[in-house]
Amino acid sequence: MLYHKTYIKDENAPWITFIHGAGGSSTIWFKQIRYFRKDYNILLVDLRGHGKSTEVVWKKTDSFKTLAAEVIEVLDELNIKSTHIISLSLGTIVAQTIADEYPDRVRSLVLGGAIISLDIRTKFLLMVGRISKNFIPYMLLYKLFAYIIMPRKEHEESRLAFINEAKKMSQKQFVKWFSLTRLINPYLSHLQVSTKKIPTLFLMGDEDYLFIPPVQKVVDNYSNFGLEIIKDSGHVCNIDQPEAFNTLSQKFISTYS
């Protein structure tokens, strides 16, 4: 089972489950825990191969659905019937997969730095990564992607947080996670349609130049999706601008608690 940690306010408080992105861990939510634990029960999970979750033997058929099922296993173990989910980056795909596969377990979604489509630049970078992932040290690739996605000096704290957590991953686990991106665009298109009934808020940094345009397009198409742009923030907006991230998330979630 995935490593997980809880902060319990009381048995009647709503739950929030935090899901990190690839290369991160539950520690990237350190600027959210104190804020949300005042009113909510909190569940933090380390996805497979990350943080304190043990090494997992991957099967060829493993997918984002597999990752979603592992989070649900934790919810079942803790007898959490339904939860809000706050997620980040590639973790937003896991969160939306949970909403797709287990809609009755999800009260609302907050998708920070959401990845819902890949443009030609991102697809090219991922293709280069897939070609070289087996013979180039994964940390070199990860640092390259981190600098491309979070290039500015004001993104340094976020960038270093993810790089330091990624160092705890093995090359094998990194390669397996990277392989999940191969068929990502068709799958993401499916998710936007299948989860359109789940209340969803996208939180994007105004400097998250690779991922804002597709999010804006999706939000324009579905009335149940909302979008807030956080100023002076990059891809990892929960660390760059935690006050704005926390306030906007809480305001949205409270509507559905």
Image (cartoon, rainbow, N blue to C red):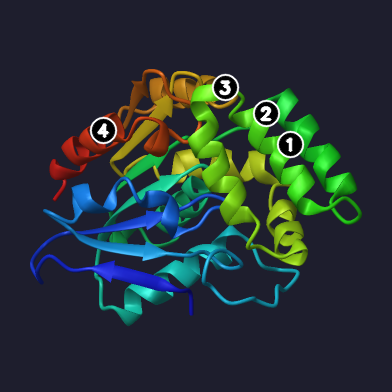
Distance in Å between CA atoms under marks 3 and 2: 9 Å
| Label 3 residue SS | loop
In the picture of the structure, the residue carrying the numbered disc 1 is 144
In the picture of the structure, the residue carrying the numbered disc 3 is 152
Pinpoint residue 135: horizontal percent, then vertical percent: 91, 54
In the picture of the structure, the residue carrying the numbered disc 4 is 243
User: Would you say the residues marked 1 and 2 are in contact, meaning their CB atoms lie under 8 Å apart?
Assistant: yes
User: Would you say the residues marked 4 and 3 are in contact, meaning their CB atoms lie under 8 Å apart?
Assistant: no
Q: Is residue 30 left or right of residue 250?
A: right
Q: Is residue 20 left or right of residue 175?
A: left
At x 77%, y 44%, the residue is 141
Pinpoint residue 52: horizontal percent, then vertical percent: 51, 71
Please identify, in this view, whether the residue under mark 3 or under mark 2 is nearer the observer.
Answer: 3
Task: Give the residue type at disc 3.
Answer: Arg
Q: Is residue 68 left or right of residue 147?
A: left
Task: Give the residue type at disc 2.
Answer: Ile
User: Would you say the residues marked 3 and 2 are in contact, meaning their CB atoms lie under 8 Å apart?
Assistant: no
| Label 2 residue SS | helix
Q: Earlier in the sequence, mark 1 or mark 3?
A: 1
| Label 1 residue SS | helix
The crowd level at tag 2 (other Cα within 10 Å; few <14, some 14-19, many 20+) is: few
The crowd level at tag 4 (other Cα within 10 Å; few <14, some 14-19, many 20+) is: some
Task: Give the residue type at disc 4.
Answer: Glu
